[in-house]
Image: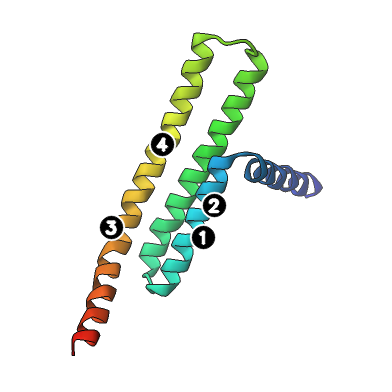
Amino acid sequence: MKQRLHSFKHAIRGIRMVLKSERNMQIHLIFVLLVTVFGFLFNISPVEWMFCLLAFGLVMGAEMMNTALETIVDLVSPDYHPLAGRAKDIAAGAVLITAIAAAITGLIIFVPKAISHISSLWSSFSN
């Protein structure tokens, strides 16, 4: 049991390190907070929440894996090497793919709700 608690402690330390040191992770966190606020404002369904949570986890997990890979590459290849650059670019591309998929998911969920909300406001002003 004590060993499991240490595992959680190390994992939480890793999350804190990435949040403090990686600008992209901070940007992802801002989007997580914005989506969460708008999720409550637009009263999204439980299924929509699940898709948002899945998107949050995939993007932030991919960003952490990218950071870990970049750290390892920098450790083993402190000088520039084309293969090191290639590995970093591929990992960054993986983050980009997950972020695009998450953004599309968010648009599918929130754009119809925003349009409906704006239409309701517009009709209340025009009456």
Distance in Å between CA atoms under marks 4 and 2: 15 Å
User: Mark 4 near mark 3, Cβ–Cβ under 8 Å?
Assistant: no
Quarter-wise, where is residue 76 in the image? top right
- Discs 2, 1 touching: Cβ within 8 Å: yes
Circle nearer the viewer, 3 or 2? 2
Q: Which mark is residue 33?
A: 1
Q: Given the image, on which type of amino acid does mark 1 rest?
A: Leu
Residue in the image at 43% along x and 32% along y = 94
Residue 116 as seen in the image, left or right of residue 37: left
Judge by depth and name the residue closer to the eye, 47 or 107: 107
Disc number at residue 96? 4
Amino acid type of the residue tagged 2 in the rendering: Leu
Where is mark 2, residue-wise? Answer: 29
Q: Nearer the viewer, residue 1 or 80?
A: 80
Q: CA distance from mark 2 to mark 1?
A: 6 Å
Residue 109: x %, y % from top left: 31, 61
Mark-to-mark CA distance, 3 and 2? 20 Å
Which of pointers 1 and 4 lies earlier in the amino acid sequence?
A: 1
